[in-house]
Image (cartoon, rainbow, N blue to C red):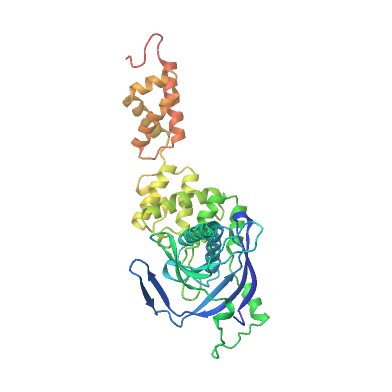
């Protein structure tokens, strides 16, 4: 490519603190897609994308393992999505990867490379690299040599196969397109782009960690966030990171992320719904968390309320719904009543607790939680049970056994 759009970039990976250099970004024209079926020894040609412009990102050979290659592609996906350049959906063909693989002994020059074409998922990229590395090592250890060639990948067998011999770069016969003159970009335009750039993935992760989130929780938010839809105007649809930012405003970020990652995302996944179909807006989610944190409803009741809102796509605010569904935490009189009933229902367990084995109180506690339909606070209920059982022991006349009347 005589005049690439950009040269001399790099992308920092978290794994092994690896820095992958990007040689250049250039414009190419899609010629179509050929798919070889090794089982039937047939090739299928798809020309639906012929003539469509595409951006080729040429990376330097800085990756030393399938894992590094996989993380590089994921990082590139997240970056392209963040700036609205591409939706990065490999399964739909928006992003495809050609992988060059070579092996060499430590301290020796890079070996002969083979190019594996059109890999359409991070998983297959890693499997294909592993397979090709093993093939090349086996060839060299048996006294053979690696031929420079283009290879395909058989997903069923998890093996690469020879497609055609590979020419060196000078033999590609690049020729300029008279309809594509050099693109001249002024510094003013570049400055405008810099000023309007969205927050990039690395900066987002650093900000989330700075709020006290664990790396795992930050990664969960970022992973789901990277799947956001890119609209026709190149603008990303709102995702879980923006949702978290809004809900956590004025609230404990750790509490908020726990509700979003463990409860909300978990319930959406259970219903096979994407985050883009989340019916609970940030204001509703914030009020639900406030109800639980303020002791107005229990954590169990909060989860019940969340499930109800997801199932019914309710636009009502959580406080109103909690009242309608009788989820508001009851006063001490109701708690005492539930605990007394539980002790009477489980007399054997109550006797064991009176005998000194307080661990058995958890079974009685379960009866309380079931009777209250989650409205009873577990900590308060446990304390009330122990208080009632110990109080009975103090109030019982001398010589009277538990259960005597």
* Quadrant (top left/top right/bottom left/bottom right) for the N terminus: bottom right
User: Residue 405: x and y, percent?
Assistant: 32, 15
Q: In the figure, 294 relative to 100: above or below?
A: above
Give left or right: position of 346 versus 240.
left
Tell me what residue is drawn at x 50 percent, y 74 percent.
234
Tell me what residue is drawn at x 57 percent, y 60 percent.
103
Q: Quadrant of residue 177?
A: bottom right
Does residue 90 show up? yes
Q: Please name whichever residue, 222 or 146, is drawn nearer the observer in this view of the structure.
A: 146
Give left or right: position of 364 versus 96.
left
Does residue 96 show up? no
User: Residue 111: x and y, percent?
Assistant: 59, 64
Q: How many marks?
A: 0
User: Residue 74: x and y, percent?
Assistant: 52, 62
Q: In the figure, 56 relative to 300: above or below?
A: below
Q: Please name whichever residue, 44 or 55, is drawn nearer the observer in this view of the structure.
A: 44
Q: Quadrant of residue 22?
A: bottom right
Q: Please name whichever residue, 228 or 177, is drawn nearer the observer in this view of the structure.
A: 177
Q: In the figure, 4 relative to 289: above or below?
A: below
User: Residue 110: x and y, percent?
Assistant: 62, 64
Give left or right: position of 46 versus 116.
left
Quick one: which residue is furthest to the top in this view? 399
Q: Quadrant of residue 395?
A: top left
Quick one: which residue is furthest to the front in this view? 143
Tell me what residue is drawn at x 38 percent, y 36 percent.
369
């Amino acid at each position: 490519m005589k005049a690439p759009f950009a040269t001399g970039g790099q992308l920092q990976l978290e794994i092994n603190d690896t820095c992958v250099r990007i040689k250049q970004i250039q414009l190419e024209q899609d010629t179509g897609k050929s798919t070889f079926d090794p089982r039937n020894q047939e090739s299928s040609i798809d020309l639906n994308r012929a003539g469509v412009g595409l951006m080729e990102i040429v990376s330097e050979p800085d990756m030393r393992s399938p894992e590094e290659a996989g993380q590089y592609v994921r990082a590139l996906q997240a970056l392209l999505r963040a700036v609205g350049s591409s939706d990065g959906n490999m399964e739909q063909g928006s992003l495809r990867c050609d992988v060059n693989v070579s092996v060499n002994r430590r301290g020796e020059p890079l070996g002969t490379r083979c190019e594996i074409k059109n890999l359409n998922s991070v998983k297959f990229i890693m499997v294909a690299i592993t397979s090709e590395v093993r093939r090349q090592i086996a060839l060299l250890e048996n006294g053979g040599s690696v031929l420079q060639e283009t290879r395909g990948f058989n997903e069923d067998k998890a093996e690469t196969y020879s497609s055609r011999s590979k020419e060196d770069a000078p033999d590609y016969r690049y020729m300029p397109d008279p309809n594509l003159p050099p693109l001249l970009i002024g510094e003013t335009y570049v400055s405008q782009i810099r000023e309007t750039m969205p927050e990039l993935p690395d900066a987002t992760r650093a900000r989330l960690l700075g709020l006290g989130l664990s790396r795992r929780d930050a990664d969960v938010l970022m992973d789901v966030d990277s799947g956001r839809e890119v609209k026709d105007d190149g603008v990303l649809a709102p995702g879980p990171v923006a949702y978290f930012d809004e809900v956590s405003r004025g609230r404990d970020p750790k509490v908020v992320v726990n509700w979003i990652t463990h409860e909300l995302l978990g319930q959406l996944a259970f219903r096979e719904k994407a985050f883009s179909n989340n019916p609970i807006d940030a204001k509703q989610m914030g009020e639900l968390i406030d109800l639980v944190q303020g002791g107005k409803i229990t954590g169990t009741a909060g989860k019940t309320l969340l499930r109800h809102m997801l199932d019914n796509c309710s636009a009502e605010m959580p406080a109103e719904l909690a009242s309608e569904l009788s989820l508001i935490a009851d006063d001490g009189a109701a708690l005492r009543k539930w605990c007394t009933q539980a002790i009477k229902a489980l007399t054997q367990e109550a006797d064991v607790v009176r005998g000194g084995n307080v661990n058995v109180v958890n079974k009685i506690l379960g009866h309380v939680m079931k009777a209250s339909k989650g409205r009873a606070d577990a900590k308060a209920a446990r304390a009330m049970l122990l208080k009632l059982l110990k109080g009975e022991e103090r109030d019982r006349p001398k010589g009277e056994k538990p259960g005597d009347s």
